[in-house]
Amino acid sequence: MTSLPANPGTKRLGLVIDLDICVGCHACAVNCKEWNSGGIAAPMTDLDPYGAAPLGVWFNRVHTFEAGEGEASRTVHFPRSCLHCAEPACVTVCPTGASYKRAEDGIVLVNEDLCIGCKLCSWACPYGAREYDYDAGVMKKCTLCIDKIYNETLDPADRVPACVATCPASARHFGDLGDPDSDVSTMVRERGGYDLMPELGYAPTNKYLPPRPRRAAATTGRGAIELPPVPAATGFLAWVDRLLSD
């Protein structure tokens, strides 16, 4: 089986996703598909996309759920992709070394020349972040647009993953989560960002920011009206965990 880096660096590149302002437009998924169809992970196969049983490779997917009940409910758009875990089971279960974690920045990648398409990594990943390419017969996944973020021919402001660059609501942020003073680490600390399924011990690098509580009252032309209370953020996080566990 594949080993993790013996001496990983402190740098941990990843994403912070704000569930409070994600509008579920799928721009992140579409631009990810566009960039990576010609990038390091190309091609990204689509089979029978308009048929009854389409198959395709998407590194970003956005799920939409209703959280809560009745008037106290709210719509939550939940983007999902590889979380580039510090202790990724998808790497340690790989029999060929195709799945690996970079020591210098913590990014988890797949060497397609070594991949035999056994799908063990997809079974080991509890977040459903692995994609099987039925044309190539190999596993693929989010690369954090590694061929973009390290491209020195681009302006520094453009060296971010395609999903971050295209988000119209600025719900996605990219940076070094291993640096406690970075913008993304500060954001996680101030907003109560959290790991998905921390009890599993995989220590995902990517973080989610929970939806903010709604205001207790809204004003109309006839005065203030009371709105139902919104469950605490911890209740929402438990709901997300149950959803992923099902």
Image (spheres, rainbow, N blue to C red):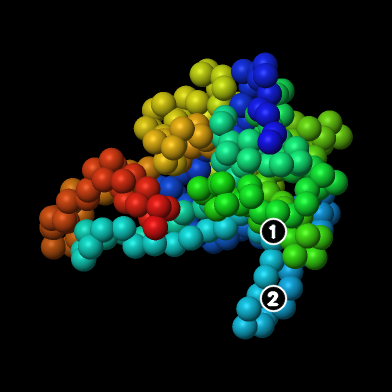
Tell me whether circle 2 and circle 1 mark residues in contact (CB < 8 Å).
no
Determine whether 219 is above or below 177 in the image.
Answer: below
Q: Is residue 15 left or right of residue 165?
A: left
Residue 83's quadrant in the figure? top right
Amino acid type for the residue under numbered disc 1: Tyr
Query: In terms of depth relative to the viewer, which is nearer, 213 or 218?
Result: 213
Between disc 2 and disc 1, the foreground one is 1
What type is the residue that disc 2 sits on?
A: Pro
**Residue identified by numbered label 2:** 49
As measured in the structure, the alpha-carbon distance from the residue carrying label 2 to the one carrying label 1 is: 15 Å
Relative image position of residue 244 (x, y in whole percent): 42, 53
Residue visible at 13% across and 62% down?
222
Residue at image location 31% in from the left, 46% down from the top: 238
Disc 1 packing (10 Å; few <14; some 14–19; many ≥20): many
Residue shown at the point (37%, 48%) measured from the top left: 241
> Mark 1 highlights which residue?
132
The secondary element bearing badge 1 is classed as strand
Residue 198 at x, y = what percent? 42, 35
Residue 194 higher or lower than 19, as above or below:
above
